[in-house]
Image: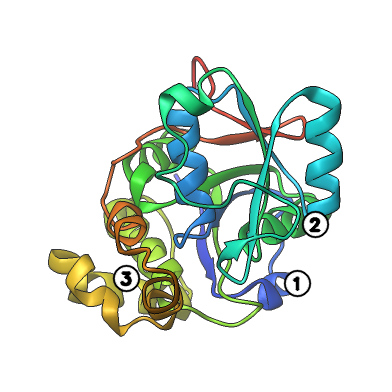
Amino acid sequence: MQKPTLHTCLSPALLSQYDVSNSIVVIIDVFRATSTIASALRNGAKCIIPVDEVAKAIDISKKIGGIAAGERDGQIAEGLQHGNSPLEYTPDFIGGKTLVLTTTNGTKLLHMALDKQADTIITGSFPNLSSVCNYLLRKNKNVLLGCAGWKDRFNIEDTLFAGAVISRIKENFTIHCDSSLMANILYEQNKNDLIGFAPNLTHYHRLVDRFGLIEDIRFCLTPDSADVLVVYEDGKLVTPSAP
């Protein structure tokens, strides 16, 4: 039986080069959107509504009694009280509530994938690595690992996560894609000490040197620290009760 294909898109700017109409698209924004999404849902959030504008997040949250949150350039976005830290969304704060989230890179890429009629969209990060891999193996469909990058540019941390997924599932997919091969090599070379490797990353310094967010970084690079499957359904990111 023919294996499904797997590709890695290293930047939203390259998404136009891929046909995703018959693929599962994994939205990857390790620092920090998809890590925060996994954390909030793991800690009992009812759902997460990803939006592309701050004003939209505020408007929707007011209408539904949700929590408007998000960031621009690593800081809590102007007009919001809550940001994009996975450690902020503890069970006593987020339990049973709806989070309306907007971020610089991750939510943007999700909406781009929607515009391209992606068959299925899930979100991926090291905190929910196993759930992502198990889902992709179970579905046995074509996969695009979509790296959110930084303002349409390549970044290493999202590519590292793509490599982690590939490392676990590559025997079950046909991979003729240099970006996937590169991601796998990058991960294999650094998998034993991701946190020790992190100071090599520009976004690490953007978050740690400027804002002191080292604990966020540790959480975002810890496999299965919030291991839930996150699927986009009817405008919301949810954890299916029976995936």
Camera-nearest residue between 30 and 56: 56
Task: Name the residue carrying label 1.
Answer: 16
The answer to whether 87 appears left or right of 198 in the picture is: right
Residue 165, image x, y percentages: 36, 55
Residues at discs 2 and 1 in contact (Cβ within 8 Å): yes
Residue 241, image x, y percentages: 51, 15
Q: Residue furthest left?
A: 192
Q: Which circle's residue, 3 or 1, is located before the other in the chain?
A: 1
| Pointer 3 local density, CA inside 10 Å: few below 14, some 14–19, many at least 20 | many
- Residue 11 quadrant: bottom right
Real-space Cα separation, disc 2 to disc 3, in angstroms? 26 Å
Q: Is residue 91 above or below residue 235?
A: above
Residue 107, image x, y percentages: 67, 55
Q: Residue at x 63, y 44 (%)?
A: 121
- Kindly identify which numbered label has been placed on residue 116: 2
Camera-nearest residue between 232 and 166: 232
Q: Which circle's residue, 2 or 1, is located before the other in the chain?
A: 1
Tell me the kind of residue under disc 2: Lys
Task: Name the residue carrying label 3.
Answer: 184
Residue 100, image x, y percentages: 70, 39
The answer to whether 6 appears left or right of 61 in the picture is: left
Tell me the kind of residue under disc 3: Asn
Camera-nearest residue between 65 and 145: 65
Q: Which circle's residue, 2 or 3, is located before the other in the chain?
A: 2
Q: Is residue 67 above or below residue 162?
A: above
Tell me the kind of residue under disc 1: Ser
